[in-house]
Amino acid sequence: AWLRASGVTIQEGQRPGPATYLVPLVAAFVTTTVAAMLARATGSTTFGEGIVLGLLLGVGFAVAFYAVEATFGNRPQPGVWFVITGLYQLVGVLIATVIVTVWD
């Protein structure tokens, strides 16, 4: 569904290059590091505070960014792409933020 919605095509027998894995890995590391720094700066230490911080970061940055991208990104199915990508990012940020918040 994401491939159709995004307009990405993969040729038969084509394998993804290293950037397909490395760029998201580095981006997740940066996001998690920033979430940990914000958790510490705000004094967040509980599960509930991690949820709140994760929702703020996820909705305020990730989902907002992908809403703009869905609107102007020229994708075949921008609404479907936004729901899949936005929720994926929101859940990822939320999980990472909760973990780094309570990890002390």
Image (cartoon, rainbow, N blue to C red):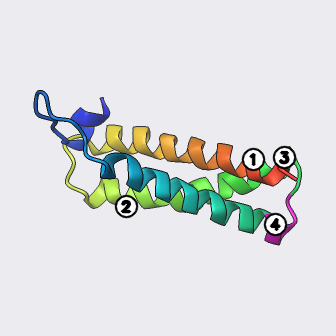
The earlier-in-sequence mark between 1 and 4 is: 4
* Left or right of 69, for residue 98: right
Which mark, by number, is residue 98?
1
Q: How many marks on residues?
A: 4
Check contact, mark 4 vs mark 3: CB within 8 A: no
Q: Amino acid at mark 4?
A: Arg
Neighbor class of circle 1 (other Cα within 10 Å; few <14, some 14-19, many 20+) is many
Mark 2 is surrounded, within 10 Å at the Cα level, by few (under 14), some (14 to 19) or many (20 or more) other residues, namely few
Mark earlier in primary sequence (2, 4) = 4
Give the CA separation, mark 4 to mark 3.
15 Å
Q: Which residue is mark 2?
A: 68
Label 1, label 3: how far apart the Cα atoms are: 8 Å
Q: Secondary structure at mark 2?
A: helix
Residue on which the image places disc 3? 48
Identify the element where label 4 is drawn: helix
Which of marks 3 and 1 precedes in the sequence? Answer: 3
Q: Could you tell me residue 39's position as x and y percent?
A: 78, 62
